[in-house]
Amino acid sequence: MTEVTGTVDFRVGKETYKTWYKVVGDLGSGIRPLVTLHGGPGMSHVYMQSHAEIFTRYTIPVVFYDQLGTGRSTHITDKGADFWTPELFINELDNLLAHLGIKDDFDLLGHSWGGMLAADYASAQQRPGLRRLVIANAAPSLKLWEQSMHHWLNKFPEDFREMLRRHERDGTTSSEEYQRGMKEFYNKHTCQVIPWPAELDQSFADMDENPTVYTTMFGTSEFNLTGSMITWDVTDRLDRISCPTLVCNGHEEGAQDFVVEPFIEKIPKVKWVKFKKTHIPFYEDKDYYFKTIGAFLIPT
């Protein structure tokens, strides 16, 4: 398997940062590549690496990268909400596509926050080079996501919910008790593969190492959204997404059916697939997931 890694300069105002990327496969092969957008915001690409399976199965080149502020890209801790915006990450994506020479012909797959970013990117303006879009386990509105997460949290005992709220009120979310509680919730509604794959643990550890992006944009947790994106909502422009789009979600996750419904109702050329378990089908239902993605990217 051919792998190439590198960095590209990304200029924001008077500052120049580095975006780290990895390409699996040959971008010069004539086969349209798939670009992946990882979740978070502020996680690294590591947990998405299994998408190299797309190249193994279908010889489609796959592009991974760490969004600014995490992983091997430039870490920044001295910027506020006016810096950490969806527009920043949209510009970073465009910059990477241009650097790799694929901006005129590519597919895009975003997972979780990456799916939100993908929906924002595709609906912000017409992008002729974007041929096919996958929005995986994501929401068109952060308020819908928060509502869904509270739905699942309310199924836990009251003393468990109060414990989480107390630590969030007191600013003690780094405590072992809070971290154990969040892991219990995530084991039920984020990833039911126990123990978690090492790549998923690594991406969460990368976010914990530098939580700036997450805390600025989202807040303390997905039950306590206080960040700058609290009003983020692209529902009213989803009809501008002109390319064929695949929307995926699971049965017991944040992207419940009512959350993804606007995607299904408003995107003109849309297909909806539901997976058996929760938020990360490429761990929980791997074979069916990659068959589904492959069939969408290479229609018969």
Image (cartoon, rainbow, N blue to C red):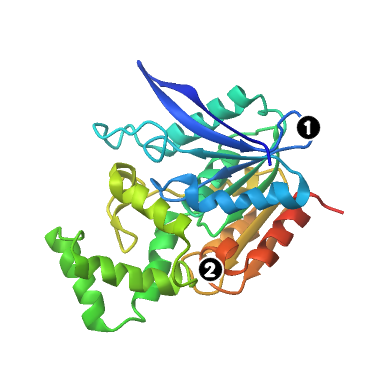
Residue at the image point whose x is 23% and y is 67% from the top: 178
Q: Position of residue 180 (x, y in %)?
A: 27, 70
Asked if residue 235 can be seen in this view, the reply is no
Asked if residue 186 can be seen in this view, the reply is yes
Q: Are marks 2 and 1 in contact (CB under 8 Å)?
A: no
Q: Quadrant of the C terminus?
A: bottom right
Q: Position of residue 216 (x, y in %)?
A: 29, 44
State the separation of the CA atoms marked 2 and 1: 40 Å
CA neighbours of label 1 inside 10 A, class few (<14), some (14 to 19), many (20+): few
Q: Is residue 258 left or right of residue 79?
A: right
Residue at the image point whose x is 53% and y is 63% from the top: 280
**Which of the two labelled residues, at mark 2 and mark 1, occupies the earlier sequence position?**
1
Q: Which mark is residue 29?
A: 1
Of residue 110 and residue 244, the one placed in the foreground of this image is: 110
Residue at the image point whose x is 42% and y is 33% from the top: 73
238 vs 98: above or below: below
Q: Which mark is residue 258?
A: 2
Mark 1: which amino acid? Ser
CA neighbours of label 2 inside 10 A, class few (<14), some (14 to 19), many (20+): few
The residue mark sitting in front, 2 or 1, is: 1
Q: Quadrant of residue 153?
A: bottom left
Of residue 149 and residue 26, the one placed in the foreground of this image is: 26
